[in-house]
Amino acid sequence: MNDRRQSDRLVSPDRLHARLGSEPPQVVDVRSAAEFAADHLPDAVHIPLDELPARLGELSAGQSVVTY
């Protein structure tokens, strides 16, 4: 039995683009500060994974969210 939620699945960039159409998602980088500083996607918001539950209010309401 697969107990992974749909939001936990990995999605390729092409498939994500096809699913979202022209609406760009809010991209949230959940890696460490050092990894984020070394390189990150343009316009990505940095919220380390361990801080994500407490900082969900910082995400845009009504906009799709992609984490990496």
Image (tube, rainbow, N blue to C red):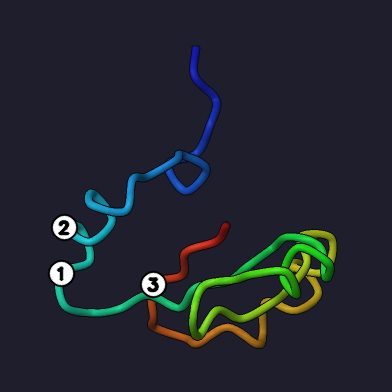
Which residue is at 76% across, 63% downward?
A: 35
Q: Position of residue 65 (x, y in %)?
A: 46, 70
Taking depth in this image into account, of 9 and 17 the one nearest to the observer is: 17
Taking depth in this image into account, of 7 and 42 the one nearest to the observer is: 42
Q: Quadrant of the C terminus?
A: bottom right
Q: Position of residue 11 (x, y in %)?
A: 37, 45
CB under 8 Å between discs 2 and 3:
no
User: In the drawing, does residue 19 fall left or right of residue 2?
Assistant: left
Taking depth in this image into account, of 21 and 34 the one nearest to the observer is: 34
Q: Residue under circle 3?
A: 64
Secondary element under disc 3, as helix, strand or loop, is: loop
Crowding at mark 3 (Cα within 10 Å: few <14, some 14-19, many 20+) = few
Q: Position of residue 55 (x, y in %)?
A: 75, 79
Q: Residue furthest top?
A: 1
CB under 8 Å between discs 2 and 1:
yes
Q: Position of residue 45 (x, y in %)?
A: 61, 81
Q: Residue furthest front?
A: 38
Q: Residue under circle 1?
A: 21
Q: Quadrant of residue 24 in the image?
A: bottom left
- Position above or below: 19 against 46: above
Q: Residue under circle 2?
A: 18
